[in-house]
Amino acid sequence: MSTPSPIRLHKELSRIWDTAPGLGRLSAVNHTVLGKRFIITAFVFFTIGGLLAMLIRAQLATSKNAFVGPDIYNQIFTMHGTIMMFLFAIPMFEGFAIYLLPKMLGARDMAFPRMAAYGYWCYLFGGSILIAALILGVAPDGGWFMYTPLNSKPYSPGINADIWLLGITFVEISALSAAIEIIVSILKLRAPGMTLNHMPIMAWYLLITAFMMLFGFPPLILASALLELERAFGLPFFDPTRGGDSLLWQHLFWLFGHPEVYIIFLPAAGAISMMVPTFARHELIGYRTVVLAIIAVAFLSFGLWVHHMFTVGIPHLALTFFSAASGLVAIPTAVQIFAWIATIANGRPKLDVPMLYLFGFFVIFIIGGLTGVMVAMVPFNLQAHDTHFVVAHLHYVLVGGFVFPMLAAAYYWLPHFTGKRSDHVLSRPAFWLIFVGFNLTFFLMHLTGLLGMPRRVSTYPLEAKWDWLNLLSSFGSFIMTIGFALFVIDVFLQVRFGTRFRRDPWSAKTLEWATPTPATSYAFASLPEISDRADRLEPAALGPKLAGGEGYLGFTRNNWMETLGVDMMTARPTEVIVLPRPTFLPFWTGLATGAFVLCLLFKLYWLSLVPFAITIGLWFVWTLTTGSRTDSAPLDIGHRQSAPPHWQVERPPSWWAMLFAIGGDAVMVTSLIFGSLFLIVVAPQWPPQTYVTVSPLLLSAMVAGAIIAALSGRFAVKQLLSGTPPLAGLSVAGVGYLVALTAATIAILNMGTLTAHAQAAMLFALLAMAALHAAIGLLLIAYGFLRHFSGKLSALRSMDLRIGKLWHDASALVVLACVVAALVLQFDLSSARLR
Amino acid sequence: MTRSSPLLTLAAGFTIWASGFAVIYAVQGVGCAYGWDLIALGPVSLLRLVLILLTVATAAIIYVVARALSGAIPGKEREASHFMLSVAAGAALLAVPATLFTFAGVFIATACS
Ligand code: HEM
Ligand SMILES: [Cu+2]
């Protein structure tokens, strides 16, 4: 294959990779397009959240203010918090990750472009539902952490809380799919030679953050589902008068909620770790130590959720665990800060606009960290809990730890998006307005908090003497807003009128600067070979070589969108990953999912089955274009090397995706089992007056069916590998699942009333969880048949069945675990109690 | 070692910390609910004894794992594995004091109030 000229190569690749204009934009699956979309959409939500914050500050500016009443105020602060956390911070970082990762790692796209597109639509539609509710005046109003019983039916009879539970869960689909996509992309889609220890440090940050999302979001999704079941059908999971416990909600929520704040901070820290070396003109000091610190933070942050619940009456001993872990987590966070300071101290720093914003980060985040250690100490916490001191603290960490680094990142990477130079007219005044305004707004809240001003109150009396502090604070927030407005204008000016500039304007040493700027849809015309750490490159020299096709895959073939998959450890090329072309399917599937959510919202449960079935059906349609009907010889990848297409290797990206999805699923199931044990042990009103029981025969049938399915799923793989059609294996597995599903359905139908006591409700939840796993297994069996009959399976092309096998094994374990937990729920264990 | 396990080793030490956390927290909850703190065993209650044993056991297991991991670090010429295993061993080693610090309360704090 001869290497074409750079221009011709560019034209050929663009023809294959570009997204069609006009309505064709709805079919975009490209990471550059989707990354920008996520970022812009998240910024729009930030603006909405910011406007709500302005309303809050307007209301609190003076005592006895009648600007908005308490009902509206409740909606405003709840939506402000919810939007900022779920619709701004997380999607903003996802956008940066999706846009930057392939370019930093030397790949042409993310691993699952259609999932990224589907995730975007779920985010947009879910977010729109919330905003629509805000406009209609029925927005959630029970606080961003949705505590029960306030958000249970008796105290929130309207649709408001349902909008939160369903809308946010809908948005979380995008967070979970992004998490899996980020993990697999980092582990598999790197440039040849870029071993894990050569990765730019931000990839480590994003890898670990994505794992945290994968394990952090399932408890929230589960809790939301349980609370929605309680609200819609009266299943009393959180109702202490019927064997539930509102503390269960708090546990599940904060098991998600605390890791969440690190999920927000770590990607920002990753961006900081990219910018600091560039402006210090020195590589990051302590690369290995920083990786260690991220791992420690990630784990520790899962062991301190109860610090949000110090005041609920948990025994002191338990509090010490969480208090200790909360203090401990400051250490690895500080280690990262020291690594940045050391890098700056050892380099020849130059102060440019991004560094100015990072200076703001340092000051504000450190103050937030210090007040964080204060509120982590139980005695102080008891004083400060639910006051404006906490509002001050949380904004110092969130705005300091996320907004300032993201502003810096925006200035740093904007030239990559635009190919233009920052002309810096407004960026400096914008910084000072935001910085001064922020501190004025929030520093004073420490004081109002210490003076006893509670959070979430719409008004306060004149006698409280909080007036002038609040007025100054509100004044500060308007200064800050002017700063943000200047920022927006500045960005607009650069995008529209900036002067064209060479690639790598900052003389950075990482790979994303080797792409053409503004980035082309295919990112790299050919993929580089990396032999050293990927933050020691010379993008200005490397870029033209790659554009000239000197790297891997510097050609086109079959109109395929190709990138390389590498071995996780050695980073040698193992497969050519053929990515899906632009398609409207994610859009339609997102719409169908949205329709399903709306049906649930309006309690049209029977009707909801229609969009549900359409969603599932569309997913099957997604798979029609993937895979191949013939076995392929290894494909040329350039440099006299070759590799098979991804559907012919043992562990392609989708295999890993299933493995990680199962990991997240395991957390969800464990949380449910934890929930049932929690109620048995801790909840009041136990034991129940009458136990609802399920026949052991049905329970055994469930387990037996699931085990048969797993075994025959394995057998089907064996058949395929030995050259026989896997029909027998698939059929028996299908029967196994049907048995399990039927048994679970009969059991559920015979349970009688589920609303009298949480024992019955939990039993139902466990059986339903088992049934859900069997149902998904059944779909995978159907998928196996579909692949077989469309000729996509052979001994060489067995990945579809092997991915199924992973699920069948896991779901057998899940069914077993749920059944065991269900058995425990049916026995009165209270006779063993000494108190 | 299989091809993907270096990734798992990174998480080894703190995964044991987390499992220990879950078990210790659960035992504390169950023990209080069922009144194990009311059963005296010499100077301490049954509950406290169990919690102390669990804490020490968690720390000990992590320490053993950390030793094994640092023993398995290959030479510098296998750069990637060297990096992964030394980070894994470091993380596990850090998890030992983290364990003792997190659960230090089992020695002193009142168990069930
Ligand atoms: C842009 C400037 C901002 C201002 C002026 C602002 C102001 C406020 C105020 C005054 C409250 C307290 C309301 C009350 O308790 O009555 C609040 C709550 C909150 N803010 Fe902000 N905020 C800003 C940005 C952010 C950002 C960027 C985030 C997150 C990334 C955020 C997250 C939250 C959360 C989670 C709450 C708690 C909501 C609740 O109590 O349910 N805020 N904000
Ligand atoms: Cu927290």
Image (cartoon, coloured by chain):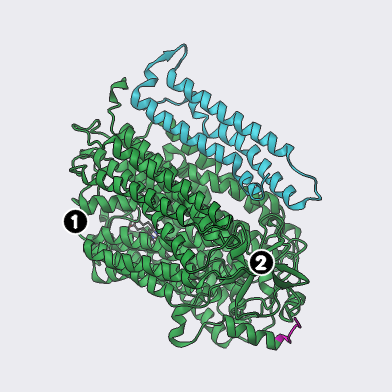
Chain colours: A green, B cyan
Q: Residue lying furthest front in this view?
A: A724
Q: Which of marks 2 and 1 precedes in the sequence?
A: 1
Image-based side of A805 in relation to A782, left or right: right
Quadrant in the picture for residue A594: bottom left
Query: In which quadrant of the rendered view does residue A441 lie?
Result: bottom left
Residue nearer the viewer, A386 or B64:
B64
Q: Is residue A262 visible?
A: no
Q: Nearer the viewer, residue A737 or A293?
A: A737
Where residue A741 sits in the image (x, y, percent)? 32, 49
Q: Which residue is mark 2?
A: A644
Crowd around label 2: few <14 · some 14–19 · many ≥20 (10 Å): some
State how far apart marks 1 and 2 are (Cα): 58 Å
Q: Position of residue A774 (x, y in %)?
A: 38, 51
Q: Which residue, given by chain and number where applicable, does mark 1 sit on?
A: A157
Measured as percent of width and height from the top left, residue A226 is found at: 30, 49
Against A545, is B108 above or below?
A: above
Which range of residues does the magenta coloring cover?
A: A1-6
Q: Chain of mark 2?
A: A
Dot 1: chain letter: A
Q: Hey, what amino acid is under mark 1? A: Pro
Q: Residue at x 53, y 44 (%)?
A: A300
Question: Residue visible at 64% across and 87% down?
Answer: A11
**Residues packed near mark 1 inside 10 Å, few (<14), some (14 to 19) or many (20 plus):** few
Residue A591 versus residue A32: which sits nearer the camera?
A591
